[in-house]
Amino acid sequence: MALIDARAARVLLTVLIFVLGLGFLYVARNTLIAFLFAIFFAYLVHPAVARIEKWTHSRAVAIAAIYALLIGLLVTFFVFVGPTIAHEGHKLVETLPGLLSQVSSGQIAEQLGAQHGWSAQTRNELQAFLYSHRDDLVNIAQRGGVRLAELAKQSWLLVLVPILAIFFLKDGRGFNNVLLSFVRSEPQRELVQGVLDDLNQMLAHFIRAQLTLAALSFLAYTSCLALLRVPYYLVLSTAGGLMEFIPVVGPLVAAVLIISVALLMNYSHWIGLLIFLGAWRLVQDYVVSPRIMGRSMELHPLAAIFGVLAGSEIAGVLGVYLSIPVMASLRIVWRRWRLYAEKRRFGPLNEYSFSTQISPRQ
């Protein structure tokens, strides 16, 4: 009689390999993040590379042409818009310590009250509230500064990611074949091929749709904040566009940031600013986003929030940006695995399509 059951041994070995794999991914998470961003960048520029490749009949020439075009666009942007954004950002950073001091001491309540005609009782209550919570306000500001410092430390990705993306653009097709060559069983090969196809479809659509949504938000913020004469509108618009990459939480943080800066700078038309932010959020969430993003992600808001919080704990700011595609990828693997398990249990089934519900193709 065997001391260890063969099936139990296989299960334990699988669990051990899975745990070791997760441990390796956690230890090497910074390197993994760089490669993931490189893959995202490759998906972003791949359609343009493929189109130029049809004309030049050379993938290397097509990649070089797209990179030259991107460099030219970046140089043009920073020459004409970059100095203004940098100047506004520098001024805002210089004024923040004084503004935070006024908030923590409660002096800002007196200024806002005088500007908006608040009663003396309202001013005193707000001043007392701010003064009693000054330690919490200072801690929030410090945590925000730490997050910005973490993001600044990852600026090396701006150089490394495009370089790594060149290899994915040039040899990406071969990577799939190499991965499939390790799979001998036909059902397992079908599982891996299905996962790769679904991931390819999801990531390509997600990256382009997310960039489109961020660009639309940037244009909407820039035009409306400039029209409303909001202080530092270019810096705030840039932050709002970048925050659009973070589902659920990002737009809320952007709105709070814009309103906070406007109030601290004694902006008088803050009610109109609130109306614009609310209206744009409704348009973006219920009109623009469903049409552009479609049903390829379909993550429940709770799952999106969990992914954002978990990504923040694992990899900081960059983990937040990667949380949603990672969650969607896990959903793809889970559904493909369910299909694979059903085929092993009940025999061959009809081919399934990647959608919100597992259903046979018509």
Image (spheres, helix red, strand yellow):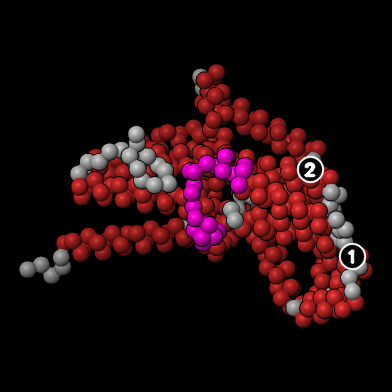
The front one of 75 and 111 is 111
Residue drawn 61% across and 48% down? 285
On the question of residue 24 being in view, the answer is yes
Quarter of the N terminus within the rendering: bottom left
Q: Which mark is residue 116?
A: 1
Magenta highlight on residue 289: yes
Characterize the local packing of mark 1: few (<14), some (14-19) or many (20 or more) Cα atoms within 10 angstroms: few
Q: Residue 157 placed where, x, y %?
A: 61, 48
Quarter of the C terminus within the rendering: top left
> Which amino acid, mark 1?
His
N-term-proximal mark, 1 vs 2? 1
Left or right, residue 108 beside residue 243: right
Left or right, residue 39 beside residue 18: right
- In front: label 1 or label 2: 1
* Region of the chain picked out in magenta, as a range: 286-308
The front one of 149 and 104 is 104
Q: Quadrant of residue 191?
A: top left
Q: Which mark is residue 223?
A: 2
Q: Residue 134 placed where, x, y %?
A: 77, 77
